[in-house]
Image (cartoon, rainbow, N blue to C red):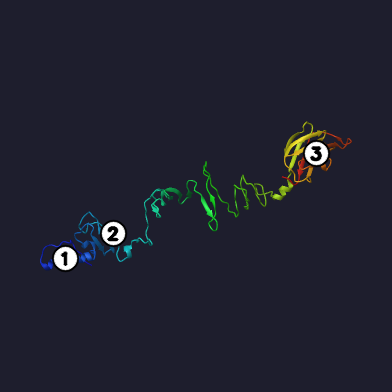
């Protein structure tokens, strides 16, 4: 270690001058290694190896020149590769890396493209910019895709993907919460919806293939087959005292034809698969027999019914209440 207190070479005897020069050269050769208190008078940008603290320092360009009051800035650590600094080739940092906030047009961290990288979008929010445009942000509360940018989920060989994105205009914030269930849900396509349980006010889909259908309380279950085979495809409650007969209420009935006293044709809004369906009839007169005369009156598009008084020689009669319900295979 060597230090020179002033790096001055005053006139003197040959031996004195030689020793003064030697001391200066040795100090320079060892970067003025030693303690700061022994430096004496320092000079701007003077290199100083502080052996008390194991640091390589350089004096400020200004300030006090006296060693005790001079300002030195640390360059790095002595006896450490690269002075403890991270080389250009990369390596591991042991301290915190703090960067400028940056912006979407000039992100503070880029990857060879000055307009693509990460920056501080706002307080506690990090943004990613692509080609100078804010693409997404993330924080401790959410991950946000901006300007309708989609989330894409690729298949096993990354050749095809499923994309999710918002509508063009969203009138209010909405939250989609996934159920804690296995299954597949697709709400806007001709497809199969096959979750274990669906709890919703409205489900809109072309084809729904559930195993069981229950009411809102989880009771009164019915299979699709039971509903298809058991529900009335057509029904009507009408008066035979008006002409034409007037329907009080009906389902899948287009018109009711009047063929004469007690003789009616009920025309369907739907087409039955065949004429082997079951027709259940009743009227408000217990003495009245109300039903089709024979099988030719049963077609896939209509049914013709007659009402006769069993207590009066089967005379055709009109009644105020006629009811018909039809069960069978149909649309």
Residue 159 against residue 313 in the figure, above or below = below
Separation of residues labelled 2 and 1 (CA atoms): 28 Å
Report the disc number at residue 304.
3
Earlier along the polypeptide chain: callout 3 or callout 1? 1
Q: Residue under circle 2? A: 74
Image quarter of residue 314: top right
Q: Residue 160: where, in percent of width, then height?
A: 55, 54
Residue 247 against residue 229 in the figure, above or below = above
Q: Residue under circle 1? A: 21
Seen from this angle, which residue lies furthest top?
Answer: 243
User: Could you say which is closer to the camera, residue 282 or residue 216?
Assistant: 282
Q: Nearer the viewer, mark 2 or mark 3?
A: 3
Residue 294 against residue 93 in the figure, above or below = above
Q: Residue 127: where, in percent of width, then height?
A: 43, 50
Q: Nearer the viewer, mark 2 or mark 1?
A: 1
Separation of residues labelled 3 and 1 (CA atoms): 132 Å
Separation of residues labelled 2 and 3 (CA atoms): 107 Å
Q: Element at badge 1?
A: helix
**Crowding near the residue tagged with mark 3, few <14, some 14–19, many ≥20 C-alpha atoms within 10 Å:** many
Earlier along the polypeptide chain: callout 2 or callout 1? 1
Residue 186 placement, left or right of 226: left
**Crowding near the residue tagged with mark 1, few <14, some 14–19, many ≥20 C-alpha atoms within 10 Å:** some
Residue 307 placement, left or right of 88: right
Q: Nearer the viewer, mark 3 or mark 1?
A: 3
């Amino acid at each position: 270690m060597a230090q020179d207190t002033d790096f001055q070479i005053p006139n003197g005897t040959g031996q004195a001058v030689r020793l003064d020069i030697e001391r200066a050269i040795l100090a320079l050769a060892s970067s003025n290694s030693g303690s700061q208190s022994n430096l004496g008078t320092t000079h701007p940008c003077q290199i100083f190896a502080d052996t008390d603290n194991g640091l390589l320092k350089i004096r400020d360009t200004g300030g006090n020149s006296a060693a005790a009051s001079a300002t030195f800035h640390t360059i790095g650590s002595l006896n450490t590769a690269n002075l403890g600094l991270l080389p250009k080739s990369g390596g591991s940092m042991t301290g915190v890396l703090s960067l400028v906030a940056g912006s979407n047009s000039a992100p503070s961290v880029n990857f060879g493209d000055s307009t693509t990288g990460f920056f501080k979008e706002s307080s506690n929010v990090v943004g990613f910019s692509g080609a100078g445009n804010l693409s997404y942000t993330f924080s401790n509360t959410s991950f946000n895709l901006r300007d309708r940018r989609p989330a894409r989920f690729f298949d096993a060989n990354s050749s095809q993907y499923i994309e999710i994105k918002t509508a063009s205009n969203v009138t209010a914030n909405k939250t989609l919460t996934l159920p804690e269930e296995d299954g597949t849900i697709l709400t806007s396509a001709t497809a199969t919806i096959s979750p274990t349980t669906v709890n919703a006010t409205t489900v809109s889909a072309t084809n729904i293939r559930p195993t069981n259908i229950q009411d809102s309380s989880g009771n009164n279950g019915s299979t699709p087959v039971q509903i298809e085979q058991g529900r009335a495809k057509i029904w009507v409650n009408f008066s035979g005292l008006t002409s034409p007969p007037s329907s009080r209420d009906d389902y899948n009935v287009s018109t009711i034809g009047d063929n004469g006293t007690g003789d009616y044709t009920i025309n369907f809004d739907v087409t039955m698969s065949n004429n082997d369906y079951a027709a259940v009839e009743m009227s408000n007169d217990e003495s009245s027999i109300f039903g089709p005369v024979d099988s030719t009156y049963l077609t896939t598009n209509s049914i013709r019914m007659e009402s006769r008084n069993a207590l009066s020689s089967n005379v055709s009669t009109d009644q105020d209440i006629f009811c018909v319900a039809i069960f069978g295979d149909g649309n």
